[in-house]
Image: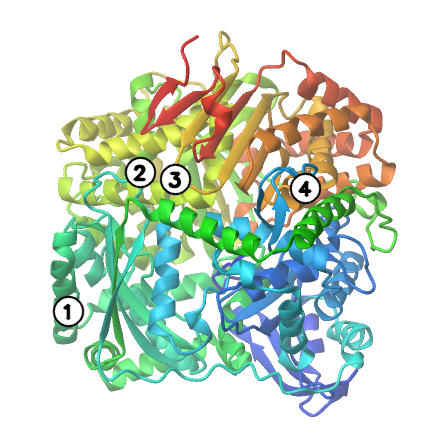
Amino acid sequence: MFPQRYQLQCRPICSRRARSSSAILQEAEKYQPGQHIHGFTVDKVEKVSELHLSAIKLTHDATGAQYLHVARDDSNNVFSVGFRTTPMDDTGVPHILEHTVLCGSDKYPVRDPFFKMLTRSLSTFLNAMTACDYTVYPFSSQNAKDFENLLSVYLDAVFFPRLKEFDFSQEGWRLEHEDVNNANSPIIFKGVVFNEMKGALTSPDQMFAIHVQNKILPSHTYATNYGGDPLKIPNLTVEQLREFHSTHYHPSNARFYTYGDMPMERHLEFIQNHALSKFTKIQPDTDVPKEERWTEPREDHVYCAVDPMAADPNKQTTLSISYLLEDISDTFESFTASILGSLLTAGPTSPFYQALLDANIGSDYAPVVGYDSSTKEATFSIGLKGISENDVETVKNIIEDTFDKVIQEGFPEERIEAVLHKIELSLKHQTTQFGLGVISSLMPSWNHGGDPMVNLQINKCVDQFKKSMAENPRFLQDKIEAYFKCNTHKLTLTMSPDSEYEAKKSAEEQVLLQEKLNSLSEDQKTEVFNHGIELAKIQNSKEDLSCLPTLKISDINPELKRTQVKKAIIESVPVQLCEQPTNGVTYFRAVANLKKLPEELMAYVPLFCSVITNLGAGVMSHHELAQREELKTGGLNVSTHTVLHHSNMNSHEQGVLISSYCLDHNMEDMFDLWTEIFHRANFDDKNTLTTLIQMEAADMANSLPHHGHHYAMLCAGSSLTPLGKVKELFGGMTQVAIMKKIAEMKDLEPVINNLKMIAHILFNRKNFRCALNTTAEGLDPAVSSLEKFLQTVAAPSKADPASHVKMIEVSDFKPSSRRIHFPLPFPVNYMGQCLPTVPYSHRDCASLRVLSKLMTSKFLHREIREKGGAYGGGASMGTSGIFTFYSYRDPNNIETLQAFKSSAEWASQGKYTQQEIDEAKLSVFQTIDYPIAPPSRGMTLFLTGITDDMKQTHREQLFAVTRDDLVNVAQKYLLSDHQTNGIAFLGPETPLTRENDDWMKVVDGQPSYIHKH
């Protein structure tokens, strides 16, 4: 569980709330410095107008714990507690501790209360994350009772965990027999984090990023692999884990955060009474010292596995040059460096994009690029991956020459304006998880003594930046000279593939295992067997969960929150209009239907989407188009769009989704850009197209270790429905293979012709429908601008009845079963099994959604994660008509497939309680009642044709699901021996596919059956 980054983005002020925004802020601003509240003392109170919030900073009197409350008119309230965690070895102690504290506490002595709360809550976010120097436990909820339930569980988990040896061995590592019940089977390493990190470190990008941090900050905690090196994790003991907890997870080392419209004083009282009153102050000794600065630059070289999906096997070297910068607690210095990082590296107009990527020397930037403030002292990195070893010196020289050029010439004024425009727009753009974004943005600096109140005041930084630029036109050039040209703390790191890398890692693991086994006496080996038996008994035991708090079905609103939309026809195009409080920003979407696209062009649609806005248009080069885009919009985006008909399994829509947003006064400019792209996209710019293809192919290949289960599920569902086939073509392993093949092509002319043909067919008003989300004041100008834009789009050759969703019906499609294995040099598996079921409006869909949650929480989580050691696994049922089983970073395959089958048998027996059924329903409602920001309201209707009335019917069906319904759908859709289904997985060679005739193996995009029939 690694940290997620959020951009600081706003929610609207909603006048319909019970307490107005002004009342919420005024209540917060009544506090005064020095005021004592429930064991805390107020340090500072600040109003931040640009973010529509007021912030209160407090200190706990007895322990010194720091506390930040952000009051805002937002019902999606957030809690977080974070600890500075500074490991000094590679055992992954903070990561394993993060997992283990969530496995039971004094007040909640049950196995895994964290995961069990996922089904007893209406949380909108529930997680824990380990960063390189802190661990954070955040959640969010819109329900006051739910918030307090989760707060109780989180506080007890982090401050009073049981840290039992069995939990440590389950989550961290253990020696155990391959077959737990067979003392003669081999003893191997098991453990959730052990397998998670084996999977994570399969990625060369992940490995490179770790090496950069280790080597540029080598003297303290950053020299370690905080997630854990699988070859070092087995050196960690449960005693060391407990000792780490006692010093690092103490209130004196804690930073508390609350956010939203709930009263702060209730939070303070609860935290004081349930946790902090039981502690006194200590000196945790977790400070990270400043890195001693080098007097000379350093170079290093590391190795990684060969990438089997690389377009050019001879270009798999990565090079990066990194510089150590200033302490991130200096707010303005950090702000300036982040702007400088964007100016230097972000987008086609940046000097490094033009110097490195446009040169087509490599496939993309190196994995670590730009300004990084995740460590106490920030770093800046620049480099390339996918280069030839012969080009290493060339890339070094380009980097030095680019710095020299920027120091001499500076940045164009428009480029700086574009970065500041992006900041302005981000303050107005609204998301549903603004509160989580705040703590994610603040935590790195706050963790090292930075003032979070200062970091919230973005406009002050912008004003100071503008003032510095006005006083010294060479302000940024001087910074570049200081940061980079005169900085001797400079690391040049290269990484190249070793064909024996995975074999060496496997051999090292076997040596470590053998050392562990050789150190065991016969009695200790018996203990290993008995420990495995006992752990399995614990995992299989039925627990009394009555101590855990839970919401009830009655806590869920039976009525859907409806969204009012208007329908219009403008220039023969169906348009959906939605008035929302969007803070002076207009949001535009359009779906261009692909119903008339020839079959042979379908494979090129994803590539078309990724390049169409990045090639330049008309008289604008791709640099100029990107510059204009940044100055006038929040981005121009095109992506594939696929959706199942709500009532027909053989009917679906396939198309592309076009989207953008802008400040209201930039509306005409935004639509002008779309006009240029639609009519004059420069597909003939082969150099730029080559760059984009190489980047896209590399991104897809690099995504496999992180999203392998996604690819497995798409492949498993591709033979079951017409939509499944299209989704796999657009985003599955088929597309990975297609992009690899295109990246290898020497002549792109056939590709260019295909892209031009797609544009010609696609950009026609008869294929279009549009949507606008904007304020009441902005609606008329938005409609007027949209009308002018649509007049420029090609009209149909003959009248075509306007309709909002245009489906393709494939009446002759016949589902078929398939078994597919993608052999890849991974030490873990990514599994997917799919079965066709029913569309959204079918009554059984509600039962299947509840069943998938029930099977995940009550069966699959135990079998796949707790017992099997996979990082994740479960079942899902959405609106695609397919029921899916999956596992992620999984050491098993045969056992996991058996778990899928056993879960269906378990579900069909109906041996679950009404409480467990209700918990599964709560999990479903978490998803369907997730808060929707104003820019996205009405989008379900626009994209899928599912109306609020249909949603309300589905909601009522969910409430009405019974045990008999669950048993019925399990038997009907999941159990039949003759049920058509698909299975796919990515992972190493295995007896499962070697010894079974019906498995197809796909290597480099080429399928073949393992055996002849």
Q: Quadrant of residue 980?
A: top right
Marks 3, 1: nearer the viewer: 3
Residue 594, which numbered label? none
Disc 3 marks which residue? 825
Q: Residues within 10 Å of mark 4 (few under 14, many from 20)?
A: many
- The amino acid type of the residue labelled 2 equals Pro
Q: CA distance from mark 2 to mark 4?
A: 32 Å
Disc 1 marks which residue? 400
Disc 2 marks which residue? 308
Give the percent coordinates (x, y) of residue 268: 75, 76
Q: CA distance from mark 3 to mark 1?
A: 36 Å
Residue at disc 1, secondary structure: helix
Disc 4 marks which residue? 861
* Lower sequence index among marks 2 and 4: 2
- The amino acid type of the residue labelled 3 equals Pro
- The amino acid type of the residue labelled 4 equals His
